Amino acid sequence: MRLVKPTVSLLLVTVFVLMASSLGFAYQRDVLRIGIPSLPNELDGQVTMGNEGQRVMFNIFEKLVHFDKEDPSIVTPQLAESWVWLDDNTLEFTLRQGVLFHNGQPMTAHDIKYGMDRAMNPATGSGSFFAMLATIDSIDVIDDYTLRITTADPDPILLTRLASLWGSFAIPNGYIEEVGEEAYITKPVSTGPYMVESFEPDRIVLRAFEDYWGVKPNVQELVYIEIPELAARMTALINGEVDLISTIGPDQVGFLEGYDHIYVLSKPIANMHILTFNITQPPTDNKLLRQALALGIDRQAIVDALFFGGTEVPRSYQFREYGSMVNEDIPQNIYDPERAKQLVAESGYKGEVLYYDGVANYYTGTNEAAEIIVEMWRQIGVNAQIRFSEKAWQNPDFNVHTWSNTMRFPDFSAQALQWGIGTTRQDGTEITQTWPDSELRRQYNELQVELERELDPDRRYDIYQEMLAIWREEVPATELWFAPESWAMRADIVWNPYYAHIMDFGGHNLSFK
């Protein structure tokens, strides 16, 4: 049996929690005001989890296990105290006792099962959640603090799935039926360090949960304020109207660093900007043209020009966080305009308009990158036209669409299931529409199934490489760069982001000098 017990660091945290509780923990600050470009439309943690949702949800919701924020290949306990593999298909969790929901209800295994059943139900959870947890055959409550999960086939990364951005968020058993769906999505209840105080279109207020089981928050109230324009966010921070802002353009970092009362933190995150191709729509239904478009982008030049070299170009469809699965021998995506011109000619492309779609200013450098890429394509003989919309995937006749592809969890299975068998985008659009049936597609699907069941790590690596080779041949999308992200905050704030857009303001991750 594979047994996992709490680590020494977890025991030290537990001691700290008990000491703080006995002494009566005092907040270091009354309020932290966070300026972000946009807020989620609802607070349903099992449905809404784009960039906006990640910034808010992880302060409200908790799950069985979680990733280490510095190294997401490490799974750490959260609502589960420990776990044991009974066999290759069966994982049993012992839950933490004494955990309360925001409504005062004690957490039990019935609540975890309720939340997971909802996430796995296509009628109530998002398509992405259903796909990520599709290997699960049954979830059984053994007793109030013992939960057993059985998979239909061996799943080498079940723990990784459960620790992912969604998976096993805890919700009180029957709570949504009790209060109604509409009430729940604006004021959800879970076990996190903060509870929802109010939800408005341009402002979300979270209040510290006084009965939180873990490290107590160091601030009593979190106020998320929607400030779409970067200049307005920066002005609000400089003037003291907010305390922390996200999504700062690289060209503005130096300006903010000139203020003594402001600290700027920058790093690439596990979010890969890509261009998706509509393979059902001419002219991008032609594989040779897609290959040409991929070769016709000088990604490093764009990274240097727009992001001041502050991020990097991927080596095919690989995240650094995949660890031993990463093939460093694959070169960074190649720029070869001469070969691209040849492929354009071989494809039979006749100069028809190719629609390049996206949402204006949604990602850092979105507009500028689009203009540069379209000009690069013009130089290889492709006539592309930019169309910015208010909503993603708005135009069914798109040929190219921008996408910010967050690493769901540190294994290629996470990205494979976004393109493979029966999967959907986060917005509900079926990805299978953009990659029609073909011999290579069938091979990819067969390899996906094998990857999800194979326990031997060496064989899993080989499978991944075969899938990457098919990906590079078919080019259903092309990778651009890892998203550079910058946050600016008052200089007395001590806070660190995770590997994604997650903004965790729990007591273990937020304090003040």
Image (cartoon, grey):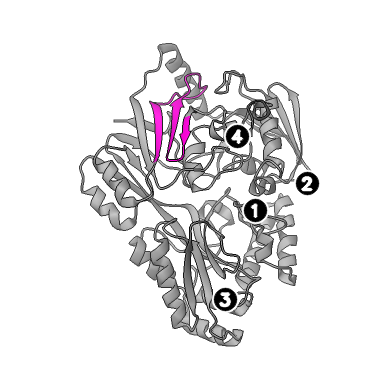
Which sits in the foreground, 413 or 33? 33
The residue where tag 3 is placed is: 291
SS type, badge 2: loop
What stretch of residues is rendered in magenta?
A: 198-225
Quarter of the figure that contains the C terminus: top left
Residue 62 is left or right of residue 366, and the answer is: right
The residue where tag 4 is placed is: 182
Residue 413 numbered mark, or none = 1
SS type, badge 4: helix
The residue where tag 2 is placed is: 153
Marks 3/2: CA–CA distance: 36 Å
- Of tags 4 and 3, the one toward the viewer is 4
Marks 1/2: CA–CA distance: 15 Å
Classify residue 146 by image quadrant.
Answer: top right
For image coordinates 58% across by 79% down, the residue present is 289
Q: Earlier in the sequence, mark 4 or mark 3?
A: 4
